[in-house]
Image: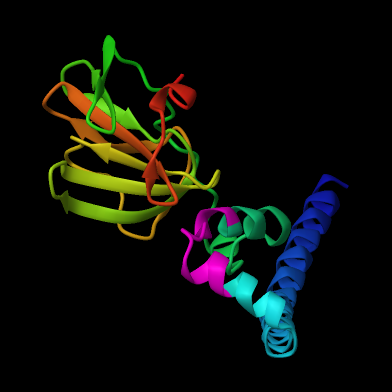
């Protein structure tokens, strides 16, 4: 009897895996079809309605468009872009999940200077997309994350960065390491720097 139950469990497991494999192409095709339909609707609306065309021109081409917010909404309602990784490997839980800690802070240029511990591991303060990694004139080594809340957060003074350009990063994960015991944060929206005190906890 025990052997029969274990054989049945094994067969049920195989059937579930086969149904996932069969469903996978339809899931991808449905997402492609839905994306195409939405694109066609938008293109038709732009062609027909001049007010909508002006709105798209203003909010997409002349304003800092939040791809991070679109990505977060897409993942919330549709899941990952391609469901293949969910089948080929198990989900990995992040090992590093920290909050920002510092010993002192003071206003500096357009943002804030934070004094942190030696070889401090810098956490990501809000989920978003990495839109810049490199040198910024008058700032130095900079990583910019376009956050899901529509604000670009500049991290300056982060060495050994753990992210790549256009990565989608999660809040609390590791951004990099501060070797100089100081990191600088600059909050920017629509090309203007914001008061850090409203956002820094």
Rendered location of residue 168, percent (x, y): 45, 53
Residue 93 on the magenta segment: no
Q: Residue at x 73, y 57 (%)?
A: 77
Q: Quadrant of residue 131?
A: bottom left
Q: Residue at x 53, y 63 (%)?
A: 85
**Which residues lie in the magenta part?**
57-69
Q: Quadrant of residue 100?
A: top left
Q: Residue at x 27, y 10 (%)?
A: 104
Q: How is the rendered protein coloured?
A: rainbow
Rendered location of residue 54, percent (x, y): 62, 75
Q: Is residue 105 left or right of residue 118?
A: right
Rendered location of residue 154, percent (x, y): 31, 41
Q: Residue at x 52, y 54 (%)?
A: 68
Q: Is residue 122 left or right of residue 37?
A: left
Q: Is residue 11 above or below residue 181?
A: below
Rendered location of residue 137, percent (x, y): 13, 49
> Magenta span: helix, strand or loop, mainly?
helix
| In front of the other: 36 or 149 | 149
Q: Is residue 181 above or below residue 10?
A: above
Could you tell me if residue 182 is visible in this image? yes
């Amino acid at each position: 009897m025990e052997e029969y139950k274990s054989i049945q469990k094994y067969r049920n497991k195989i059937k579930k895996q086969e149904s996932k494999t069969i469903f996978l192409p339809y899931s991808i095709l449905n997402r492609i079809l839905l994306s195409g339909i939405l694109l066609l609707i938008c293109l038709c609306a732009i062609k027909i309605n001049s007010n909508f065309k002006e709105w798209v021109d203003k909010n997409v081409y002349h304003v800092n468009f939040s791809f991070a917010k679109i990505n977060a909404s897409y993942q919330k309602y549709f899941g990952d872009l391609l469901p293949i990784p969910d089948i080929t490997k198990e989900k990995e839980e992040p090992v590093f999940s920290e909050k920002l800690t510092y010993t002192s802070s003071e206003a500096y240029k357009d943002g804030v200077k934070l004094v942190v511990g030696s070889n401090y591991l810098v956490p990501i303060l809000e989920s978003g997309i990495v839109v810049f990694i490199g040198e910024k004139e008058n700032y130095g080594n900079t990583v910019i994350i376009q956050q899901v809340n529509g604000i670009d957060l500049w991290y300056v003074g982060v060495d050994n960065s753990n992210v790549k350009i256009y990565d989608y990063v999660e809040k609390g994960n590791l951004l990099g390491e501060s070797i100089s015991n100081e990191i600088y944060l600059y909050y920017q929206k629509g090309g203007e720097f914001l008061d850090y005190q409203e956002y820094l906890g």
